[in-house]
Structure formats: C-alpha cells, structure tokens
Image (cartoon, helix red, strand yellow):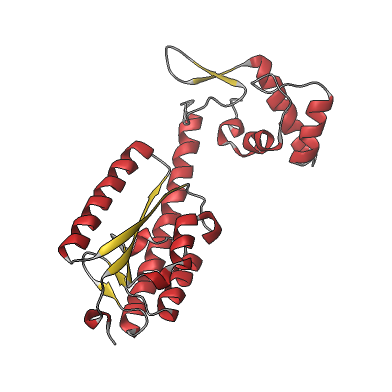
C-alpha cells in the first residue's frame, strides 16, 4: 500500500533546533511549529509534538531523547511529520536508524512538500539517503567554518564566548581579551605539564595538590582542564 492511499489521521510532529544562537533558533522553532500545526489542521491530522533543543555535538541517538521517544512509540502514529528531512537528523547513523524504523513499521515521513513512503518506495529511500548525506556534509562544513572563525577571532583578541576564559579579562574600552598575569601563570603551567606528556587527570591532581585555584577560587576539576587545553585562545603566540 502506498503512503498516498493510507488513511493518515494521527501523526508524530517532530521539531528540532540547535542550541547555538538560541534566541534566533527559538523564533525558528516557533515558526516551524506554527507551519506544521497549520499543515496538520488543514489535512485533518491530530498530532503529538516532540521538540528538542540540541547542542552541536549531539551526534548519537542517546543524546536525542525526544527522537528516541518518538521512535519507541512510532506504532501509535500513522506517520512522522517534519518541516524537512534534515530536521530529523544531520547524522548518517541516526538517519539510517530512523529509516529502518519507518521501513519496519511502515510509517511514512511527511513534509509540507512531499510524502516519503520509505517502506514501499525505493525512490523515496534513495531521496531520503541522498538528503541525509547532503545534510551531514553541510553540517560538517559549518562546523569547520565555525572553528576557523573562532580561531581568527581569538587571534584578533576578540571575546568569542559567553564566559571569559581563565587567564584573561575583557577590556572595558576595546572589548578585547587581555591577559590576567596572575591567572596566566596557572595556564602556562598547565600547558607546560601537558607538553611533558601529562594528561588532564594528572594535571588536575598536580594543580590541586600544589594549591592552585580556579577562577572561582575552588579546586580545578577535569572539565576545566580539558577546556583550557582545547580552547584556541590559549594557543596564540601572544599568550
């Protein structure tokens, strides 16, 4: 039976936005929600909504609780409703999981532009997989551009995140980051230990044993050490 001839009455409405640029994306989420609600109403569908805000690193299904919940309950619905296929996932493995569920349970994916009958149409499966590949490549490219932009901003001394990195203060006049010499000694020590081949666990233990304090005046924890070692702002020659 093709999806176009199925009696679709109750759908799972899935909405996803990225945690980056929250204010802009929440507006996008509201627009997508209104679009799908109007589409569902016009087609006589009842619906349940599954929404989630994800970080850029949410690349596993276990980090997508609402999508996982939808798939676990997919038998309750006649179809899955999304704004576009890329809203389901930009990750190839997750997309393949969604595809397999849709094929196993004979559930089409509906967008305002098309019905994808993944259980019965090889062409729709091909379109789905091709769209997933393009979305995945686009996501990877955006990630590379974002990382490059952060490095360039760090080189220019610009403040690139919500919190000021340990070892810096922000200039009230230029708004650029300036080195806090007292904290910078700790950062240099961390990198010195790291160049000697010590890992984050050992560096943390040494700092705490020797009485070094974090920006909050507390002992260093593992995430803070890893954050310092990963942050491109510390890797500039000027530090």
Name the foreground residue: 1 vs 160.
1
Residue found at x 64% / y 20%: 216
Name the foreground residue: 144 vs 213.
213
Vertical comparison of 210 with 102: above or below: above
> Which residue lies most toward the bottom here?
1
Vertical comparison of 84 with 56: above or below: below
Q: Quadrant of residue 137?
A: bottom left
Query: Where residue 136 sits in the image (x, y, percent)?
Result: 43, 62
Residue found at x 64% / y 21%: 215
Name the foreground residue: 92 vs 41.
41
- In the picture, which quadrant includes the C terminus? top right
Q: Quadrant of residue 81?
A: bottom left
Residue found at x 37% / y 82%: 119
Query: Where residue 55 sits in the image (x, y, percent)?
Result: 48, 47
Side (left or right) of 134 relative to 143: left
Side (left or right) of 109 relative to 188: left
Query: Where residue 173 sits in the image (x, y, percent)?
Result: 42, 12
Q: Quadrant of residue 73?
A: bottom left
> Which residue lies most toward the right here?
209
Query: Where residue 149 sits in the image (x, y, percent)?
Result: 44, 39
Residue found at x 58% / y 21%: 168
Report how many numbered discs are placed on residues in the image: 0
> Which residue lies most toward the left here?
42
- In the picture, which quadrant includes the N terminus? bottom left
């Amino acid at each position: 039976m093709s999806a176009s001839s199925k009696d679709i009455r109750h759908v799972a409405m899935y909405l996803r936005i990225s945690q980056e640029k929250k204010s802009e994306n929440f507006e996008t989420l509201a627009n997508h929600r209104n679009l799908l609600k109007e589409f569902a109403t016009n087609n006589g569908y009842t619906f349940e909504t599954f929404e989630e805000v994800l970080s850029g690193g949410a690349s596993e299904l276990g980090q997508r609780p609402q999508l996982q919940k939808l798939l676990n309950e997919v038998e309750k619905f006649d179809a899955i409703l999304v704004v576009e296929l890329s809203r389901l996932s930009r990750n190839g493995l997750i997309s393949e999981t969604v595809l397999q569920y849709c094929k196993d349970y004979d559930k089409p994916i509906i967008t305002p532009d098309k019905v994808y009958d993944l259980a019965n149409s090889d062409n729709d499966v091909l379109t789905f997989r091709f769209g997933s590949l393009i979305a995945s490549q686009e996501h990877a490219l955006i990630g590379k551009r974002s990382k490059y932009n952060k490095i360039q901003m760090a080189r220019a001394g610009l403040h690139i995140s919500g919190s000021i990195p340990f070892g810096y203060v922000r200039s009230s006049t230029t708004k650029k980051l300036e080195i806090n010499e007292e904290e910078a000694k700790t950062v240099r020590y961390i990198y010195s230990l790291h160049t000697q081949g010590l890992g984050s666990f050992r560096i943390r233990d040494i700092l705490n044993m020797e009485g070094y304090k974090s920006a909050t005046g507390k002992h260093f924890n593992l995430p803070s050490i890893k954050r310092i070692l990963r942050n491109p702002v510390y890797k500039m020659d000027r530090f």
